[in-house]
Image: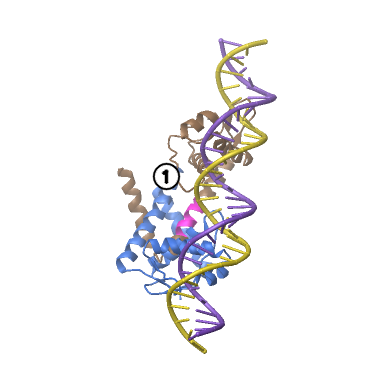
Chain colours: A brown, B blue, C purple, D yellow
Amino acid sequence: MISFEGLILTAGVPIYQQIVLYVKRGMAAGTIVDGDELPSRRVLSALLGVNPNTIQKACRILEEEGLLCSHAGAKSYASVSPRQMEQIRRQLLQADARTLVEAMKQMGVTREEAVTLITDLWKGEEEV
Amino acid sequence: MISFEGLILTAGVPIYQQIVLYVKRGMAAGTIVDGDELPSRRVLSALLGVNPNTIQKACRILEEEGLLCSHAGAKSYASVSPRQMEQIRRQLLQADARTLVEAMKQMGVTREEAVTLITDLWKGEEEV
DNA sequence: TTAACCGTATTATAATACTAATACAGTTTC
DNA sequence: GAAACTGTATTAGTATTATAATACGGTTAA
């Protein structure tokens, strides 16, 4: 059963997008693997405190991308091949890193300063 | 006169937020300094191809944060003290880096891998 | 002073995101 | 087969984002 305990909803970003991203990142990390069972729409909506329609929207997107297998009446399961897993991992990493690099450059930050900032933050959060 | 040539609007994020962020990053980088003149609402809206109301919303936010000085009938000017500049820089850097670190950790990426990814991307974009 | 600019405000319209309340049909289990 | 689930669809209402079309009054320079 896929766990959503690690998902902390942030204001300002569409909820369905956050759910999709959470699942994709889990797949990239290997914490969500092929065949894993998804909680039902109703259970998940109660768990996250959002509307069932919002959950359904996220699930529909995941299914359209071939990452979720849903059939009316039956439970839903993760569907990820090793190839898909690698592709998702690469795409997400590239996107996140590119966003940061562009932001840093716009602020006139040097590469060394950026690396220092990240390593420091990494250590800092490990203590918490 | 503050230049907005470097601002590339992205779909999915509110335009007024992108404008506010662009100005703040310019202030953090030192490319926008205290007293710099802002293009008029109408000129800027034509330049970016967005509605004047959207520009006005961004300007209202910047003024409420004390970063823009506007008076009816007169032109608008950037208003940044050295203390504000440092504060903005620190806030934005922290926010961006924190977002990346959380994403990386969710995907099971090591600190070394993250640093490598960023340094590579930095070099790669410098060639372009 | 008057014309041309400036910031500001208002009203209306449309698209998207999200909530809310149902309803329906397929699957599973006892 | 019936009850309890499951995914799916529909309709309605609200808030935010953005556009559109004006309008008003202050500032500035010819």
Quadrant of the snapshot with the C terminus of chain B: bottom right
Query: Which type of secondary structure does the marked residue at label 1 adopt?
Result: helix
Instruction: For residue B17, say whether it is visible.
Output: yes
- Mark 1, Cα crowd under 10 Å, few <14 / some 14-19 / many 20+, is some
Query: How far across and how far down the image is residue A22, in percent?
Result: 49, 41
Query: How far across and how far down the image is residue A17, in percent?
Result: 53, 44
* Amino acid type at mark 1: Lys
Which residue is label 1 attached to? Answer: B105
Query: Where are the magenta residues, as a range?
Result: A93-101
The residue closer to the viewer here, D2 or B126, is D2
Q: Main secondary structure of the magenta part?
A: helix
Left or right: residue A76 compared with residue B67: right
Residue B43: name its quadrant. bottom right
The residue closer to the viewer here, A19 or D28, is D28
| Above-or-below relation of D17 to A67 | below
Residue at (41, 63) in percent of width and height: B62
Residue B106: name its quadrant. top left
Query: How far across and how far down the image is residue A92, in percent?
Result: 52, 49
Is residue A97 covered in magenta? yes
- Chain that bears disc 1: B
| Above-or-below relation of A114 to B3 | above
The residue closer to the viewer here, A103 or A11, is A11
